[in-house]
Structures are given as structure tokens and as C-alpha cells.
Image: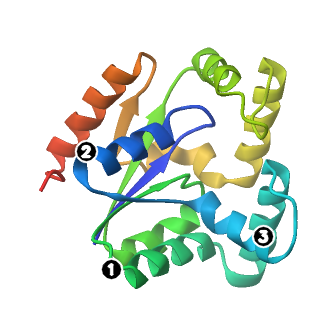
Amino acid sequence: MIIIGLLGFIGSGKDTVADYLVSKYGFKKLTMSDMVKEELRKNNLPISREEMQKLSIKYKAKHGNGIWAKKCVEYAKKNNWQKIVISGVRDTKELPEFKLGGNFILVFVDADLEIRLNRLQKRDSEKDVKSRTELISQEKREIEIFDLFREYSKYYDYRISNNRDIANLKKETDKFVLKYKLDK
């Protein structure tokens, strides 16, 4: 199994890259947050970024730091998927679970803060931040909670810059696919 993990701050374009890999190259998409949201639903808890962070911390304490990665890999194997892309990898302790699951490549999707803020404001999702102050605060919380955000440069295998338009992001993603021969 080929597992592409996407890492990046909120609004960087992780889901856009994932959706492109699905539509053009036949990958199946999972998000770490899908697994967390499913557990929130099971426990009748509200689905918010804050609740997701709380539950993530609780489950990691109870089941180990790789619990969400393990759930993603199990889900993919259960469905017999051979090429998966996982949006929202955030913790170094998840990486071994992904590596056990198959050929794992970690990709950092990067975009400047102001560009991300503009995207988030246009996206206008109820779970997204609305101001620069909120975005900076959100990122500080994520850096405190998820160690991969503090040390990402040590771990990623490939970086995709997303400071331009979607057409350029697709070109950058194509370069990544060709480099790793994932178009087969």
C-alpha cells in the first residue's frame, strides 16, 4: 500500500492536494479528522476544532499517540485500498503507524500566513478562524498540541509550495507524483 501523508497549517491546501490526488491519480482520501469526528459522533459531542483537539489528546493518552494513524491504516486495509492520501498528519508518533501500513511519504503543503488567512475567509466554514489574530492563536495551540508542527522540517520527504493559484498547486503536485512514480 502507498500512503501519502499531508502535513500543513490550516488553510495551506492539504485537502486541495488530497482531492487532486484522488481525482487525477486514483488515490482514496482519508483525513485524520474524519476518524476524530467519528468518535465525537459516537460520544454525542459537538464537532468543533476545540472538541477535536480535546478528544485527540484524550485518546492518545488512553490508546497511544499513533491511535488516529492506526485507525486510518486499518480503515484503508479493511476497504482494500492500495493508494491512500491522508490529510492532516500532525504528530511524529503517528509516523511509525503509517510506515507499518505501507510505503509512506510525508508531504509538507506550505503557504504564507496571509495567503492562508485570505483562503480561510473566502472558505467561510464555521470551524475556521475569521481574523489574523484568531489564526495566529489557532496555530500556537496546534504547535503546542502537535509536535510535528514544531519539527516538521526534520520529517517531511517532499514540500509543495502553495502560495499561488490552484493551477500552480496542481503542477507542483504533478511534480511530486512523477518524482515518486505514483502515477501508475
Left or right of 43? Residue 2 is left
Pointer 2: what residue? 24
Q: Position of residue 21 (x, y in %)?
A: 32, 47
User: Does dot 1 land on a helix, a strand or a loop?
Assistant: loop
Q: Residue at x 65, y 20 (%)?
A: 122
Q: Position of residue 80 (x, y in %)?
A: 33, 80
Ranked by sequence position, the earlier of labels 2 and 3 is 2
Q: Residue at x 41, y 17 (%)?
A: 165
Looking at the image, do the residues carrying marks 2 and 3 touch, with CB atoms under 8 Å apart? no
Ranked by sequence position, the earlier of labels 1 and 3 is 3
Quadrant for the N terminus, please. Answer: bottom left
Q: Position of residue 66 (x, y in %)?
A: 59, 73
User: Does dot 3 land on a helix, a strand or a loop?
Assistant: helix
**Which residue type does callout 3 highlight?**
Arg
Front-most of residues 172 and 77: 77
**Which residue type does callout 2 highlight?**
Lys
User: Does dot 2 land on a helix, a strand or a loop?
Assistant: helix
Q: Residue at x 87, y 71 (%)?
A: 44
Q: Residue at x 54, y 32 (%)?
A: 12
Badge 3 density bin: few <14, some 14–19, many ≥20, Cα 10 Å: few
Q: Quadrant of residue 134?
A: top right
Q: Residue furthest right?
A: 45
Pointer 3: what residue? 41
State the separation of the CA atoms marked 1 and 2. 19 Å
Quadrant for the C terminus, please. Answer: bottom left
Ranked by sequence position, the earlier of labels 1 and 2 is 2
Q: Position of residue 107 (x, y in %)?
A: 39, 46
Left or right of 109? Residue 183 is left
Badge 2 density bin: few <14, some 14–19, many ≥20, Cα 10 Å: few
Front-most of residues 183 and 99: 183
Pointer 1: what residue? 80
